[in-house]
């Protein structure tokens, strides 16, 4: 007897949502067991996390703060994934965006009219991120170099570059030797909405709407979807793959770059500690949201809650914040494992072999 | 260039390269079977944390190593289960493993010290370097190559064994066939799934061992982010080594050497900021990747397992 | 040819009785009997879809039959896996070789060998291979890597693999499909030698001259059943052609007189290679006029696919020209072909013709989305798209729960209607249709064919590549028969017998070469 997996012909959203929910529950149980192993009460821990993330207005704003970069990088990552280009480099692209914005804020703003500073920061930040993402894209397009590794290596280089800058030549001369740049002038501040939530949120939501619009309503979006769904068909109907790859990566890197701008201009208002892993969490956001712009906003918010909850856990129960990473990993495992049930039907059949490649001719 | 300088550089190179090579060898075998395991970083850091924690509490260094190897096997098993049996996307599965592993290791690092405190700053059983009799008296290489810890010496033995296994045995032949053209291997009666499981888990064991070396020989302690991206460099090294164990050795020496150079330059007060020195391995990796890929495109086969990352399912028709 | 003439059971190497094999929607083998004696060469002849490969895959342990039994050397055999078949002395060389390119010949031979020592003894393997190679004129360097070998040499390795494992019944699936004439002759020699030594050989083919030249007996399959089982010496090419092709009328369609206009598509001296680098098109010349359907007949793999791909811009040619309504479109992009008025109904609708996960609407607009009214600047006008999609769904009676349903959920027939609708809508004079009714039920087939005839009425030039002779005879005004990349002849279906077409398909040059049916003496 053999267990055969047969591709499902029909799929139901209900099944999809149900398996997602079940995966989440199983992941929670799995992590609860781990927590128990460390002598921590999982119910208490989860309670603290939920409270810390969503339990008060302050909590909600803090969650929103973390959600903003996740939304932007998540959108950026998603559009690349749509074309089956594995952009792992959102972290580095975000960093470059922050660097460019910092440059404008600290070194160009004295010479510019105040009103132009922010827009310039956003533009140059997006451009910097776009270029950072374009390099691996070109390497893939013309030389066929695996983009997972190149984008990843670019991350490390970017992170080191940021560190170098705020520990070295851009270090605040009046900072008493502490790391980080000087604070930005007010013209370079992204306005705050409530609590520490800054206008980056508006940019993120606009970006999501724009992405939805592009994918659903424009010819370019149609081509992107087609390439991702069936490369052969795209080729057959005359779509230019190379051109689209470049455009998509410009957008992908650009969005991550804007995330970096938003972080330095809205949140920290200086360049310090920019690279905390949003670019990597963004991949999970995009994937869990099935690359759907609207879902990304929601999932980003939920995952941000996970991160904030982890921080709160550290403060309240002295439990390492790393538990949120563990939870993220576990959720992914179970979602990955359960995806087979939505894509395939299980059949029990007598053993059968098939000659590879030989059809019935 | 005097002997002391050479010995010093070589010594650090090998010390830095040992864990890198263990991980690379492990991933080579996994990828040779056709499975891409991007979770190397996660497995490695878990190996480091496990080794240190277990050896600290049990006061036995070897028990720590054993635990690291087992943990590596277990984590790799999760990846192979998801990738092979559950037909999940190998890239995402590997990334999930990295995130999970780094998170859990960090957790352990903060909670597995005595009384549930941090492991940072603790000192436990470790593997120190010791010179081999006779061999260590050779000039230049004596006090560098033959003055390492036991895990490095084990590695010296492992390289030729793995090379022989891969190219000279029937089992190695089957492994190479599975990663290259699973349909052909299947038609000749080889169990593709079982082969893939086996070598993914084996790879995980070596990667766990790599982590153990970090926390018990190289650093002899625990630090947050002890791996610092070594796992990812190992993945790139696999490509650099064109999936060959002996070439991997040279690759690890090269990257270990860059590490060593960083140290020396910093110690010598060089004017290049340390950040840029730290960038070198990563820039170098990109250059290597470009060269290897471009070279392969010119036509000469460099041995990338053709079926790497592609799922194999006999039952599926289009 | 050497062959035993006695009838005792023991002389039969293989006997298959009542083999039946079903796949979803297809009865591939229907109560098939087959037998081959030791020292005999049996040809298994038939068209595409006749069931030849399936039958042999059953014998070689790849498939389990639903009914029937197999006797090997008189003993009942359970062929559960390729390993079991090999243990029984049966080995098969498939059309797609099971070789690992990055390993050497010796390593490939050794692969999966039962009872092989842990440490490989390649020297011994190489020695044995050399001996066997010499014995059967299968010259190949055991130390060479597979990727270095020519296709013919690779095939020799496949045979050596089987000999090394002691096979005494060898099955070869379309062995000369990938060989040059010289290599094919060498192979024939090898097979004769093996037969002389008592081995049983079965080769699957659709080429009549091979059957006549190399086999002792021939079994003809048609639509899953045995059509004949005769001694080669007692039959003729014509008989075989007729048996192979037969006649099966599903329905008749009304076809008006051909009212051909100007030349719409012209192909001159076209030469192109296939994916393996072997010439697939050799100096092909064709013309299609407006309001005409030119059919392309031939067994799959004789260049038809490559022809369609070159014309639609998906493959580059090494020589010749393709002119669509006066515009040269050779070696340009698919976009250029589309702009020149060429629309394409591809042979694999799920591979190239559709994006299965995208909704029906997205699939329908795949050609039209660049132009107004669907395109409004950079945008896609939802409104125009909606009415466009609805119009096509109605016009072509596409049965779908809604325009947003993913295409993969539609039945095969409706999927094909989607492709047709899109291409017909987009066509501006020239259509290339490849196997348009493959895998469809009777109703869908009828509607597809009616659509094509309707397009012909409108004055479109249609190139119809099909493996279904009924389709061609019903729809085409002229039929060009392809064999090994060349046009064997262009015939008028109303004036040509199926037998003649069958001969052309199997490699016989035509004695007629024009529509008017004038006979020319064969040079």
Image: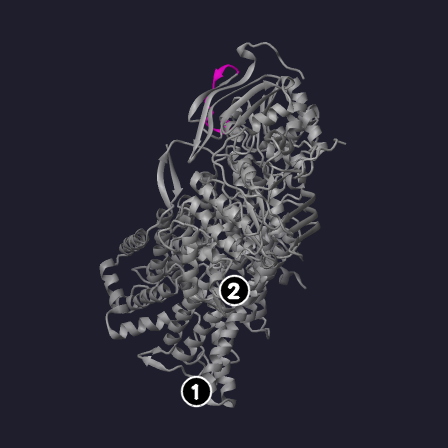
* Neighbour tally class for label 1: few under 14, some 14-19, many 20 plus, Cα within 10 Å: some
Residue C371, label in figure: 2
Residue C113, picture quadrant: top right
Residue nearer the viewer, A111 or C381: C381
Please report, as a chain letter, where disc 2 is located: C
Q: Position of residue C81 (x, y in %)?
A: 47, 28
Considering only vertical position in the picture, is C339 above or below C299? Answer: below
Q: Position of residue B171 (x, y in %)?
A: 53, 36
Please report, as a chain letter, where disc 1 is located: A
Quadrant of the drawing holding the N terminus of chain A: top left
Residue A187, label in figure: 1
Q: Is residue B46 visible?
A: no
Q: Report how far apart the C-alphas of labels 2 and 1 lie in the structure.
A: 46 Å
Residue nearer the viewer, C28 or C488: C488
The reply, left or right, for residue A330 in relation to residue C13 is left
Examine the structure image and report whether residue C43 is included in the region drawn in magenta: no
The reply, left or right, for residue A204 in relation to residue C354 is left
Q: Position of residue C31 (x, y in %)?
A: 46, 23
Residue nearer the viewer, B218 or C72: C72
The reply, left or right, for residue A29 in relation to residue A119 is left
Quadrant of the drawing holding the C terminus of chain A: top right
Return the residue found at the far right.
C523
Q: Which residues are magenta?
A: C73-83
Considering only vertical position in the picture, is B132 above or below C247? Answer: below
Q: Position of residue A139 (x, y in %)?
A: 58, 62
What residue lies at 23% left-to-right and 63% top-to-bottom?
A: A47
Residue C295, label in figure: none
Q: Which SS class for mark 1?
A: helix
Residue A68, picture quadrant: bottom left
Considering only vertical position in the picture, is B187 above or below A142? Answer: above
């Amino acid at each position: 007897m053999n267990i055969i997996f047969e591709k499902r012909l029909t799929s139901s959203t209900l099944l999809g949502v149900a398996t997602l929910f079940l995966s989440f529950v199983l992941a929670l149980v799995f992590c609860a067991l781990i927590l128990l192993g460390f002598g921590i009460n999982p119910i208490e821990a989860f309670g603290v996390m939920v409270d810390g993330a969503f339990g008060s207005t302050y909590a909600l704003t803090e969650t929103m703060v973390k959600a903003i970069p996740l939304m932007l990088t998540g959108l950026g990552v998603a559009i690349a994934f749509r074309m089956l280009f594995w952009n792992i480099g959102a972290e580095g692209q975000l960093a470059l965006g922050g660097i460019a914005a910092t440059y404008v804020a600290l070194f160009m703003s004295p010479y510019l009219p105040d009103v132009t500073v922010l827009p310039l920061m956003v533009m140059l930040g997006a451009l910097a991120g776009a270029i950072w993402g374009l390099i691996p894209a070109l390497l893939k397009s013309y030389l066929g170099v695996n983009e997972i590794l190149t984008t990843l290596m670019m991350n490390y280089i970017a992170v080191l570059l940021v560190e170098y800058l705020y520990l070295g030549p851009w270090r605040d001369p009046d900072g008493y030797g502490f790391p980080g740049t000087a604070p930005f002038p007010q013209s370079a501040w992204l306005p705050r909405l409530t609590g520490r939530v800054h206008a980056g949120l508006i940019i993120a939501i606009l970006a999501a709407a724009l992405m939805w619009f592009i994918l659903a309503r424009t010819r370019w979006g149609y081509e992107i979807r087609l390439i991702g769904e069936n490369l052969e068909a795209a080729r057959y109907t005359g779509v230019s793959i190379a051109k689209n790859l470049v455009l998509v990566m410009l957008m992908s890197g650009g969005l991550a770059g804007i995330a970096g701008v938003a972080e330095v201009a809205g949140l920290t208002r200086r360049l310090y500690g920019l690279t905390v892993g949003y670019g990597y969490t963004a991949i999970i956001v995009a994937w869990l949201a099935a690359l759907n712009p609207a879902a990304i906003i929601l999932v980003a918010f939920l995952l941000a809650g996970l991160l904030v909850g982890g921080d709160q856990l550290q403060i309240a129960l002295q439990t390492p914040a790393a538990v949120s990473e563990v939870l993220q990993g576990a959720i992914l495992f179970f979602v990955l494992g359960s995806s087979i049930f939505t894509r395939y039907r299980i059949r029990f059949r007598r053993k059968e072999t098939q000659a590879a490649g030989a059809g019935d001719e | 260039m005097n002997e002391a300088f050479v010995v010093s550089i070589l010594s650090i190179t090998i010390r830095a390269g040992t864990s890198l090579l263990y991980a690379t060898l492990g991933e080579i075998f996994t990828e040779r079977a056709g499975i891409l395991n991007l979770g190397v970083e996660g497995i490695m850091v878990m190996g480091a944390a496990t080794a240190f924690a277990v050896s600290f509490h049990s006061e036995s260094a070897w028990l720590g190593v054993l635990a690291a190897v087992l943990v590596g096997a277990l984590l790799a098993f999760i990846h192979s289960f998801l990738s092979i049996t559950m037909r999940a996307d190998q890239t995402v599965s590997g990334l999930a493993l990295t995130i999970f592993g780094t998170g859990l290791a960090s957790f352990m690092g903060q909670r597995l010290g005595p009384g549930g405190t941090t492991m940072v700053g603790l000192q436990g059983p470790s593997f120190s370097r010791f010179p081999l009799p006779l061999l260590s008296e050779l000039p230049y290489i004596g006090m560098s190559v033959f003055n390492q810890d036991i895990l490095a010496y084990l590695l010296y033995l492992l390289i030729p064994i793995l090379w022989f296994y891969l190219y000279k045995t029937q089992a190695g032949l089957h492994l190479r066939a599975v990663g290259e053209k699973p349909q052909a291997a299947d038609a000749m009666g080889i169990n593709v799934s079982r082969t893939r499981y086996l070598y993914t888990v084996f790879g995980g064991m070596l990667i766990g061992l790599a982590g153990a070396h970090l926390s018990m020989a190289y650093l002899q302690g625990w630090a947050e982010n002890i791996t610092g991206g070594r796992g990812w460099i190992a993945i790139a090294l696999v490509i650099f080594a064109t999936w060959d164990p002996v070439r991997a050795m040279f690759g690890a020496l090269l990257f270990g050497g860059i590490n060593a150079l960083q140290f020396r330059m910093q110690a010598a007060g060089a004017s290049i900021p340390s950040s840029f020195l730290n960038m070198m391995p990563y820039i170098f990796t990109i250059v290597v990747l470009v060269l290897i890929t471009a070279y392969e495109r010119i036509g000469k086969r460099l041995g990338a397992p053709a079926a790497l990352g592609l799922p194999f399912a006999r039952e599926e028709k289009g | 040819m050497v062959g035993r003439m006695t009838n005792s059971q023991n002389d039969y190497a293989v006997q298959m009785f009542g083999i039946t094999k079903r796949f979803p929607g297809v009865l591939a083998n229907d109560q098939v009997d087959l037998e081959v004696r030791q020292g005999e060469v049996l040809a298994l002849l038939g068209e595409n879809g006749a069931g030849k490969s399936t039958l042999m895959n059953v014998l070689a342990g790849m498939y389990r039959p639903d009914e029937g039994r197999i006797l090997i050397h008189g003993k009942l055999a359970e062929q559960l896996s390729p390993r079991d078949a090999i243990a029984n002395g049966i080995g098969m060389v498939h059309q797609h070789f099971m070789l690992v390119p990055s390993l050497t010949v010796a390593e490939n031979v050794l692969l999966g060998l039962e009872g092989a020592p842990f440490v490989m003894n390649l020297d011994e393997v190489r020695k044995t291979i050399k001996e066997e190679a010499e014995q059967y004129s299968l010259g190949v360097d055991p130390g060479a890597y597979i990727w270095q070998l020519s296709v013919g040499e690779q095939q020799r390795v496949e045979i050596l693999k089987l000999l090394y494992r002691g096979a005494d019944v060898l099955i070869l699936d379309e062995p000369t499909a990938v060989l040059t004439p010289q290599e094919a002759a060498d192979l024939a020699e090898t097979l004769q030698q093996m037969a002389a030594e008592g081995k049983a050989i079965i080769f699957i083919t659709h080429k009549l001259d091979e059957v006549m030249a190399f086999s002792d007996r021939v079994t003809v399959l048609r639509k899953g059943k045995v059509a004949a089982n005769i001694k080669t010496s007692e039959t003729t090419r014509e008989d075989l052609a007729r048996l192979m092709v037969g006649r099966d009328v599903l329905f008749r369609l009304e076809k008006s007189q051909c009212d051909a206009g100007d030349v719409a598509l012209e192909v001159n001296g076209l030469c192109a290679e296939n994916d393996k680098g072997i010439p697939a098109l050799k100096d092909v010349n064709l013309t299609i006029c407006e309001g005409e359907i030119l059919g392309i007949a031939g067994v799959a793999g004789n260049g038809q696919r490559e022809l369609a791909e070159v014309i639609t811009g998906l493959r580059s040619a090494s020589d010749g020209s393709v002119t669509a309504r006066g515009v040269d479109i050779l070696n340009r992009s698919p976009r250029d072909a589309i702009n020149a008025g060429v629309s394409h109904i591809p042979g694999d609708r799920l591979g190239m013709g559709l994006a299965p996960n995208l909704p029906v609407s997205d699939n329908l607009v795949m050609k039209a989305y660049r132009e107004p009214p669907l395109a409004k600047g950079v945008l896609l006008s939802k409104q125009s798209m909606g009415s466009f999609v609805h119009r096509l769904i109605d016009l072509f009676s596409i049965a779908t729960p809604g325009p947003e349903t993913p295409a993969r959920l539609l039945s095969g027939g409706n999927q094909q209607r989607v492709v047709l609708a899109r291409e017909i809508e987009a066509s501006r004079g020239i259509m290339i249709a490849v196997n348009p009714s493959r895998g469809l039920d009777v109703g869908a087939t009828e509607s597809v064919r009616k659509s094509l005839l309707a397009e012909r009425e409108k004055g479109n030039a249609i190139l119809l590549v099909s493996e279904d002779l009924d389709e061609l005879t019903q729809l085409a005004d002229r039929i060009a028969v392809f064999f090994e990349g060349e046009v064997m002849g262009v015939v008028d279906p109303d004036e040509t017998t199926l037998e003649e077409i069958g001969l052309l398909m199997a490699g016989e040059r035509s004695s007629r070469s024009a529509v008017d049916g004038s006979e020319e003496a064969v040079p």
